[in-house]
Image (cartoon, rainbow, N blue to C red):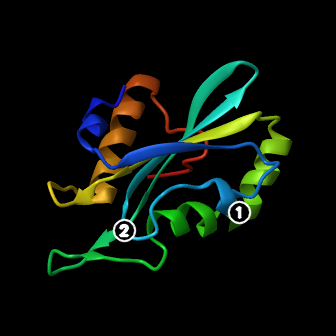
Amino acid sequence: MFDQLKKYKSNNHFFFDGRSELENVCNAPKNANGVYLVYALKNGRVELVYIGSSGKIKQNGKIGKSKGGMFDKIVNGEQFGKPRIKSWKQKLLVEKIDALDIYWYETFIKNHNDIPLYVKGSIIQIYFYINENLPEWNKEF
């Protein structure tokens, strides 16, 4: 669905099932920024529930490196009123989700200086064209 992500060679994914700690299973880089897609695995189905990004571009064209990079944004970023390290565990229980499959892509690197928020917006736009709404956990854009 999101062919433009294929060009980012620095990428990976990990599973979070709520039995382990998010900071122990997250393999996103601590010194890089980009986008991440969260898929919920529930009742034998897979559903894209969230599209996120980390890193903002400064006026001088350089990316503002946040301490902890994409890893920190995924693990400690606030969602549902709490850091994800807590809120995702609760979400899995409440929504009876078996696991989350989180894919991440480093978008602002040597060969691709693609602004993470721009890439996030283009992916959300494609999702919106197809589904006429945002992913369930993206409340607005």
Residues 16 and 39: in front is 16
Q: Amino acid at mark 1?
A: Ile
Q: Position of residue 116 (x, y in %)?
A: 32, 58
- Vertical comparison of 76 with 45: above or below: below
- Vertical comparison of 79 with 38: above or below: below
SS at badge 1: helix
Judge from the rendering whether residue 84 lies leftward or rightward of residue 11; answer left or right.
Answer: right
Q: Position of residue 39 (x, y in %)?
A: 58, 36
Using a 10 Å C-alpha cutoff, classify the residue at mark 1 as few (fewer than 14 neighbours), some (14 to 19) or many (20 or more).
some
- Vertical comparison of 72 with 133: above or below: below
Q: Is residue 125 visible?
A: yes
Q: Residue at x 30, y 49 (%)?
A: 119
Q: Amino acid at mark 2?
A: Gly
Q: Residue at x 49, y 74 (%)?
A: 68
The residue tagged 2 is 55
Q: Position of residue 8 (x, y in %)?
A: 27, 45
SS at badge 2: loop
